Amino acid sequence: MTLTITHARSGERAPSVTLWMMMVLTFVTGVVDAVGFLGLDRVFVGNMTGNIVILGMAVAGADDLPVIGPAIALGTFTAGAFIGGMVLRRRRKIWSGGVSVLLGSGAAVLGLLGLAYVVPGWSESSALELAASSATAAAMGVQAAVARSLAVADVTTVVVTSTLTSLASESLVSGGVKGLWNRRFAAIAIIFAGALVGALLLRFGVAVPLLVAALLTLVVVAWGHRSLHVPV
């Protein structure tokens, strides 16, 4: 009976609360993608479409683009998504303990990387740069798997191409200008804001935006676990 009541109470507030939390994670993606592209040798850590395009151009020898960083990021993002999927495969569309553990682990990775960049002499290390882009991509893969499991419509937290398509081809067509003001527009605006903030914070070094991303992710974990956690 207790479990049933918990499900019911969580279900009543889950859609709006989960939406807000996914928006915060979308902002985090914007921050870390700015770090990856501007601070870690032009590697996207959340947007894998960007990495595939960079790899294609790099293989063609265009503009001295990196190969190793984007390739490893693709692999670690995929590994992170796989791990997330395995953990959550039997607990879809609910905030289980697995969701908290996965997102908490991602926050820990971002936080540790941020602290590593504070250590004197480490910030210029190419090995740390590669480790940071790879580990951050893995954390974003986990985050993407969590977002897919929670299944908030139009908010994947890591990509907005499909969201932009839906906004233009459905919201704008059906509702005109008024149809723009919805979660689709919000997701696009928030990832833009995250990238803007990430780029600005990079002026203080790579550590600062990574630590901010870690803190925001921890806020989501605490908020979600407190508000929506369903024991299973």
Image (cartoon, rainbow, N blue to C red):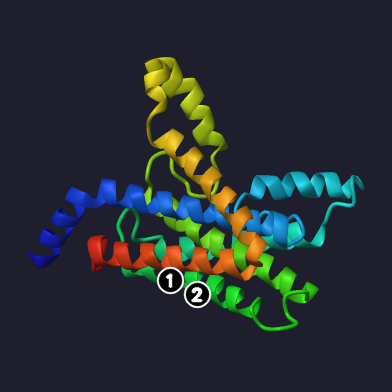
Q: How many marks?
A: 2
Q: Quadrant of the C terminus?
A: bottom left
Q: Describe residue 100's horizontal placement relative to residue 141 as left or right.
A: left
* Distance Cα–Cα, label 1 vs label 2: 6 Å
Q: Residue at x 58, y 48 (%)?
A: 196
| Res 104 label | 1
Amino acid residing under circle 2: Ala
Q: Pinpoint residue 56: horizontal percent, then vertical percent.
A: 81, 45
Q: Pinpoint residue 101: horizontal percent, then vertical percent.
A: 40, 72
Task: Name the residue furthest right.
Answer: 61
Task: Name the residue furthest bottom.
Answer: 120
Q: Residue at x 58, y 49 (%)?
A: 195
Density class for disc 2 (Cα within 10 Å; few <14, some 14-19, many ≥20) is: some
Instruction: Quickly name the residue at label 2.
Output: 108
Do labels 1 and 2 touch, CB within 8 Å?
yes
Amino acid residing under circle 1: Gly
